Image: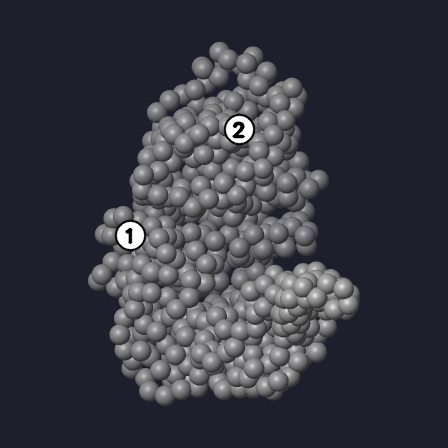
Amino acid sequence: MIGNLFSESWYRVCDLRVSLLYSVKIHKQNFRGKTWFVLSDPFNNHFFRIRVEAYDFLMRLSTKYTVEEIWEDSLIRNPQSAPTQDEVIRLLSQLHMANLLYFENTADTKAMFDRLTEMSRKERVKTIASILFLKIPLWDPELWLRRYESLIHSIFSRLGAIIWFLIIGIGIKTALDNREQLFLNTQGVLAPDNLIYLYLCLAFLKFFHEMGHAMLTKRFGGEVHTMGVMFLILTPLPYMDASASWAFRNKWHRILVSAAGMIVELFFAAIACLIWANTGEGLIHSLAFNVMFIGSVSSLLFNGNPLARLDSYYILSDLLEIPNLSNRSKEQWNYILDHYIFGLPHVHSLAESKSESFWLLFYGALSSAYRILLSVGIAMFVMDKWFILGLIFATMTIVFWLVKPILGLVHSVMFEEKYLRVRFRAVLITSLFIGAFVWILGVIPVRNSIRAPGIVEIQKFTKLIASSDGYLNTIHKHNGEKVHIGDLLFEFYNPELSMDLLVARAQIQESEALKSRAMDRLIADLEPIHERIRFLENKVKSLLEKQEKLKVYAEVNGILAAPNLHKFLHSHVRQGFEIGSIVPKEAAEFIAVVSQEQAYDLFQYQDLRGEVRLFGNADQTLMAKRIQIIPYEKRELPSAALGWLGGGSIPVEQKDGVTTRDSFFEVRAELDKTHLNLHHQRTGVLRLILPPNTILNQAYRSLRQLLQKRYQI
């Protein structure tokens, strides 16, 4: 037994006479070599996990004895493992909340169970917070599952697993064979004319997803009594209650039940992939693609994420063998706060080992961050559809994730009895924490800047073009070297041209021989021979000119910019191919794109400073000089590389790839490139440095800009 044995709240429960309901069933489970017990009540379908120590105490509960008498007996029998009075109070409150206890004396139940009242209040608050995740039970599928139990055993069998893996393998191969077309179709999955198909396929798949959970629960001996409709962000979708699987002793059975929905969806996705790949444009083709997309990408993205309390959460919990992973991770963080921060002496960790403690803390931190981001994303999504409802949800998100934890912490350290002996330290640390939090957010000015994507523009650069086909044979100047007018940069070799030159010269020699013979015998043949010689000499001259063009000379002074030159050495290059360029030594310009809301801040300041980082050289920073904001709106990007279709981040129309959906302002800045070779149209990011400002002011400004842009308020 670890911790403080006695509790100042013990008087509230010591005289109670309670016992477990007669309908409660107990199932034994093992986690990390430790024994756990699951209490279940088939009448209300409630489940509750407890440790061995709590189990020993609960088995002694009887209305013939008071809670205090039973606890004292447990203390005598097992002084090292008996629960403390605080643990007994918490255990009884939780069991009463789960409707698993019978009370003989119930007159003072409400007064005695302050913890229960608090839990009830939290449940009501949780219900209000879950207004966008309402569940309405409609059907008890247990009779249907019993009727087709033999069919369920046939489907979820070894033969069924072999067929599943075979279909999934064929589906993956088909998807890989058609990956380019698949990627193109994915671009239009959220198109307005596809949304109705998307929802119909989603409802279809989610029904079989939930049936998969129900059938596997039945396959392993459980019962399923609830199926219905869940309004997920006001979108009706099917759901079922598979909590009966919690009582399964075999952890792999529990894992399979949790994964059943994804298993079914992936199977349908593989079949849909085969249909999609073998049909032409039409309704069947579109429906098959939507089923494939939802059953694979969507299923794995959402149900496959263990940070949300969906299927993968329960899979992870069983794989780690840490039951109640989410709740225990919160309690572990509370233990860190109470023991190490507030110095509470009589508290102990729920973790049985260092590795379990690590997983609890790690999961608690990641899941909390994910849920905050998810709540913000849902609030923005709902605001796009129903602004007032989304605003209410956003307010609730702020209250539940920021205001409520802070107020709860303050209330706990000020009034909870467990902090009585360390209240001064707890209040002091909490005050310092809140003060530091407010000071960091609202007082300290921090770095303030605006990031704007853009491109390098050099007006006076000279392109180096291959004037004829050939193999790059010799490189005289390398990328980044300074060159002057007339410098030989590199040479090409064209074997066909050399052969033509040898043939032409041989033909001239042959014609000269014919000319000598004609002067002695056939003077009348001299004129055609002279014509042939002149033709061949012109041909040689032309070939020599072409051969000379295989040598590339610098036509201007500057820096050779040919980063891929070494890749073409001894390789064939076609005529007209751009080998590189010669960049003049004058400073280049960086043209950046700034949204309207960001430009509002820029117009308020003079003598802006900035720096540029180019993609591919992110470790080197270029100073931006003489920054100028062009004072009129534009809709056409300086380069398609900045838009969505070119791999950039700016939304553009699909018709040309350069016309933006929203107007923007153009910012031009000179670049000091003395230490870095620049290339025309190279993309990067301009960071415009603004006067330092507090985090709170910057967040408020960003929020106002967002509301103005998306909702025109």
Residue sitting at x 72%, y 72%: 474
> In the displayed structure, does residue 325 sit left or right of residue 591?
right
Asked if the residue at tag 2 contacts the one at tag 1, i.e. Cβ–Cβ closer than 8 Å, the answer is no
Q: In which quarter of the image is residue 194?
A: top left
Residue beneath disc 1: 383
On the image, the x and y values in percent for residue 165 come to 63, 28
Residue 530 vertical placement versus 321 (above, below): below
> In the displayed structure, does residue 151 sit left or right of residue 436?
right
Sequence order check, earlier mark of 1 and 2: 2
Label disc, if present, on residue 607 of the rendered structure? none
The answer to whether residue 53 is seen in the rendering is: no
Q: How far apart are marks 1 and 2 (CA)?
A: 38 Å
Residue sitting at x 50%, y 13%: 148
Label disc, if present, on residue 274 of the rendered structure? 2
Q: Is mark 2 on a helix, strand or loop?
A: helix
Indicate which label's residue lies in the foreground, 1 or 2. 2
Give the class, few, some or many, for how many residues have Cα within 10 Å of label 1's Cα (few <14, many ≥20): many
Give the class, few, some or many, for how many residues have Cα within 10 Å of label 2's Cα (few <14, many ≥20): many
Residue 389 vertical placement versus 622 (above, below): above
